[in-house]
Amino acid sequence: MTTILITDDDPNIHQLLSIYLENEGFQVLSAFHGEEAMQVIQKEEVDLVILDTMMPKMDGYTACMKIREIRNMPIIFLTAKSENLDVIQGLTIGADDYMTKPFQPLELVARVKSQLRRYHSLQGSTTKTSSEELVFDNLVINRKTHQVERMGQKIELTRREFAILELLARNHGIVFSIEEIYEKVWKETFINNENTVMVHIRNIRAKLEDQPKKPKYIHTIWGVGYKFQSE
């Protein structure tokens, strides 16, 4: 089920939007300021955020910038201001759309659906495998230059770490045992080298994942091995 996070300090906004969004089949989560929104996003799988600009503790502009550091889902601003500079500021720091209060709930629902269609369409078009690059949403693995970027930021991996990541990503969804990883990357016969592979996997996760203990890319299949699965 697609999950929408409403972040606004007005309980009436939550009640109104929840009715309309739930009637369209969406799951709705609530936060009443930016700090609470960040806590929800770090714990839950959120597909789109509706974000008020003026809130206590953390305003919408700050929350938007912090969300963009860790997630790439659509963000729609709600603002009581209609001046062009406020709209431009919101779009510049990472918002995808905005609506000025007071607003028509049905129009907002339509914009939610539009942003979700656009987001999923872009995901489908950018997830690909080519001769030189493996691209998974915000992660780019360049097989020719041995460079890795995530959300535009370079990730420094050692030669072995890159080889492991490239092996798993190139075989998206396929589980490799520790023995298979070792023999394909080290080009040696596997003899009690479990810790060597596990340490390298741990190092990759520490560099690549927002939450290494809850990995988004390299997943452990207990008793079998590891696989790359972009969520």
Image (cartoon, helix red, strand yellow):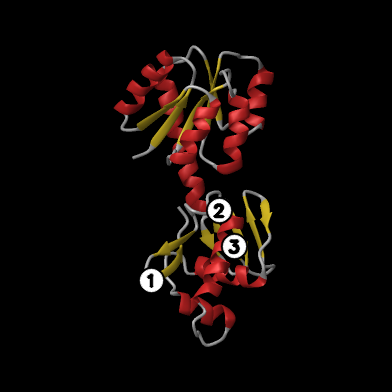
Q: Quadrant of residue 225?
A: bottom left
Q: Which residue is mark 2?
A: 209
Identity of the amino acid at label 1? Val
- Near mark 2 (Cα within 10 A), the count class, few <14, some 14-19 or many ≥20, is some
Q: Quadrant of residue 96?
A: top right
Query: Compared to 163, does 135 lie above or below?
Result: above
* Residue 214 coordinates in the image, percent (x, y): 47, 52
Residue at image point 55% right, 53% down? 209
Query: Compared to 201, does 66 lie above or below?
Result: above
* N-term-proximal mark, 2 vs 3: 3
> In the drawing, what numbered circle is on residue 224?
1
Residue located farthest toward the bottom when viewing the structure as drawn: 189
* Residue 143, visible in the rendered structure: yes
Identity of the amino acid at label 2? Glu
Residue at image point 60% right, 22% down? 59
Q: Which residue is mark 3?
A: 203
Query: Compared to 199, does 21 lie above or below?
Result: above
**Marks 2 and 3, how far apart at CA:** 10 Å
**Marks 2 and 1, how far apart at CA:** 21 Å
**Left or right: 203 as drawn, with respect to 168:** right
